[in-house]
Image (cartoon, grey):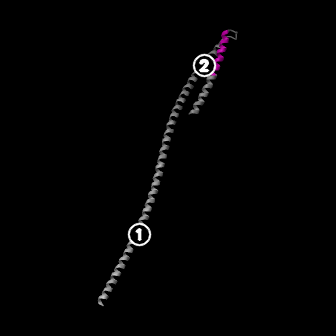
């Protein structure tokens, strides 16, 4: 019976060994499944972060493009404004020069007018002579010219003030 008992003990030991091996294998499988699930979660999280970062990069690239487009628009506007400013400066200079010319004309016609007035006063009373009538006519023209030039100067001065 010894041999039966020994065989039985050996079989029971083999069974315990097999059960321990099965239990160990189950634990290993569970551990591997746990690790696999953990790896899947980590992969999903990483993929989610990558997708989020990819979207952020795309949004930033769109913003950079929008800013570049704006800067090109601002540059074009700035160039246009410079050209307009140069044109306005030329117009102001022209109007200033024209104003100075008209002032000189007013001074000239004022002197002419004053000379005619002096000649009229120096002449004797109205005699009906042609020279007197010519002087009166010239005086009237000179007065009209002075008034027109003064009006033109005021108009030019107002334009210069508006453009500045």
The residue under the point 59% across, 33% down is 162
The residue under the point 29% across, 88% down is 3
Q: Toward the viewer: 143 or 121?
A: 143
Q: Residue 109 — which label?
A: 2
Element under disc 1: helix
The residue under the point 59% across, 30% down is 159
Q: Toward the viewer: 80 or 106?
A: 80
Element under disc 2: helix
Disc 1 residue crowd, few under 14, some 14–19, many 20+, Cα 10 Å: few
Query: Marks 2 and 1, how far apart in space?
Result: 111 Å
Q: Name the residue under label 1.
A: 33
Q: Residue 137 — which label?
A: none
Q: Give the residues drawn in magenta, as a range.
A: 130-146
Q: Toward the viewer: 116 or 97?
A: 97
Q: Position of residue 28 (x, y in %)?
A: 37, 72
Q: Residue furthest left?
A: 3
Q: Where is residue 66 in the image (x, y as percent from the top left)?
A: 49, 46
Where 27 falls versus 64 (above or below)?
below
Q: Which of marks 2 and 1 is in front?
A: 1
Q: What secondary structure characterizes most of the magenta part?
A: helix
The residue under the point 35% across, 79% down is 18
Mark 2 or 1, nearer chain start: 1
């Amino acid at each position: 019976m010894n041999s039966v008992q020994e065989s039985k003990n050996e079989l029971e030991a083999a069974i315990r060994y097999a059960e321990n091996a099965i239990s160990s294998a189950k634990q290993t499988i569970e551990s591997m499944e746990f690790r696999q699930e953990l790896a899947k979660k980590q992969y999903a999280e990483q993929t989610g972060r990558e997708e989020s970062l990819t979207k952020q990069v795309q949004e930033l690239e769109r913003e950079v493009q929008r800013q570049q487009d704006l800067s090109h628009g601002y540059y074009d506007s700035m160039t246009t404004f410079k050209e307009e400013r140069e044109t306005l400066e030329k117009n102001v200079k022209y109007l200033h020069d024209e104003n100075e010319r008209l002032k000189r004309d007013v001074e000239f016609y004022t002197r002419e007018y004053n000379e005619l007035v002096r000649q009229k006063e120096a002449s004797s009373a109205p005699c009906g002579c042609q020279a007197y009538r010519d002087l009166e006519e010239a005086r009237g023209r000179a007065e009209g010219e002075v008034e027109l030039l003064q009006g033109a100067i005021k108009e030019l001065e107002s334009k210069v003030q508006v453009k500045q």
